[in-house]
Amino acid sequence: QVAAEPKPIRRLNENLINKIAAGEIILRPASALKELIENCLDAGATSIRVTVKDGGLKLLQIQDNGCGIRKSDLPILAERFTTSKLSTFSDLKKIATYGFRGEALASISHVAHLSVITKVKGDTCAWKAAFSDGVLVDPKTLDKAEPKACAGNDGTTITIEDLFYNTPTRLSALRSTSEEYSRILDVITKYAIHNPKVAFVCKKSGTSAPDLSTPSSSEIPATIRLLYGHSIAKELIHHELSSALPKNVESESMDEYEDSRDEDPSSWNAELYFTNANYQAKKMVFLLFINHRLVDSPRMKKALEAVYTNILPKGASPFVYLSLQIDPRAVDVNVHPTKREVHFLNEEAITERVADAMQQNLVQQNHSRTFEYQV
Ligand code: ADP
Ligand code: MG
């Protein structure tokens, strides 16, 4: 048999490359929303209002009262690798592992109709811009365009319409709009709990009553009560812990100690809210934030659920909120940066410390309860 002729190698066209990259970052409406919420929080918003139509596939709109975007920045807003959050290589080392180095809005503009209305405080008017494939365009003709002046409040409103209109396979993989809507509510619920000072609202377009609404200036336990209910909130244990102090701390001056701690990529701290033995759910509810980003860690989830093996009856599960702050340099770079699932340095050791702390608290509580019963 004669070997087949080799086919010529061709360079993929840039639009196709961008579309492939976009598909890896924006998996579904809820993953687009997560990016947008993080942008609002980065912009210092204290109010975030989300409007949804057809599970976010028809419309996903998010309005914040943050710092806004300057008119002069709008032309490159949706280009890949344009960001206000990183400029030097040493910055990069610190935040590269979160994955979204100015890629979120660019990605969205490749798989949806994206438009922005934004106003910087003190400016006389707001500016409106539409984007297609990274470029600022006239939404009707799709020709290159300039931002248009319009009325608007301080802050930014991002509108995503017809998500995945040009990637039919992705669209057909998302069959149920109610499933997508519940994922959207889940993302907002979790960010609302982690950011109790920020007011969150989520509603379906065309309805007046929101499906989710939190006040500003609240606290984590109150927000858990509001969004997950009293039965969880009344059984919560709060605990904070951190990496042990380095040895020889006495021999160093405090300044040096602060410096060395700053330099130590293995230092970390954790805040926990978890239910005691009185609460039983069918499925574990696990909220994990690493450096304020909502992430998945099935391994950590399993390890923390295992703490309850001898505490809850078989088949019953807890609620656990864990906010971990670790040195950004300790996040494992080998994991695809756009995946929500993360690995980090000393993951096992940190998980063990957290699990131990939970265990101790739970056992202590059980003891005091037994004691109460005895007297
Ligand atoms: P990144 O967040 O990694 O910078 P994005 O594509 O998410 O990348 O956003 C690009 C830039 O657009 C941000 O760096 C920020 O300057 C600006 N931006 C996006 N959303 C907002 C917002 N809601 N408020 C103010 N600025 C925003
Ligand atoms: Mg972003």
Image: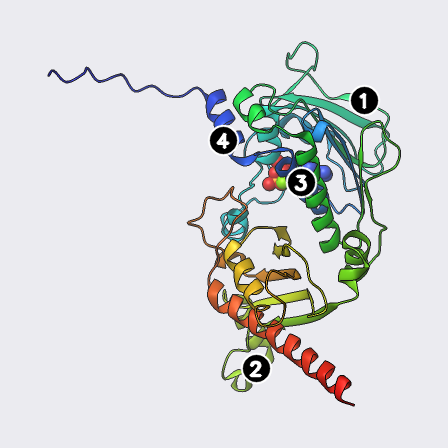
**Residue underneath mark 1:** 149
Asked if marks 4 and 2 touch (Cβ < 8 Å), the reply is no
Residue 201 visible: yes
Disc with the residue nearer the chain's start (1 vs 3): 1
Residue closest to the far top = 141
Spatial separation of the CA atoms under disc 4 and disc 2: 49 Å
**Eye-nearest disc, 2 or 1:** 1
Seen from the viewer's position, the closer of residues 11 and 124 is 11
- On screen, 204 above or below 14? below
Q: Is mark 3 within 8 Å of ligand 2?
A: no
Disc with the residue nearer the chain's start (3 vs 2): 3
Disc 4 marks a residue whose amino acid type is Ala
Residue drawn at (71%, 70%), measured in percent from left and top? Answer: 237
Q: Is mark 2 within 8 Å of ligand 1?
A: no
Disc 3 marks a residue whose amino acid type is Arg
Q: Quadrant of the C terminus?
A: bottom right
Disc 2 marks a residue whose amino acid type is Ser
Asked if marks 3 and 4 touch (Cβ < 8 Å), the reply is no
Query: Of the numbered discs in the image, which one, if any, rests on residue 293?
Result: none
Query: Of the numbered discs in the image, which one, if any, rests on residue 21?
Result: 4
**Residue underneath mark 3:** 183
**Residue underneath mark 2:** 253
Residue 291 visible: no
Seen from the viewer's position, the closer of residues 241 and 355 is 355
Disc with the residue nearer the chain's start (4 vs 1): 4
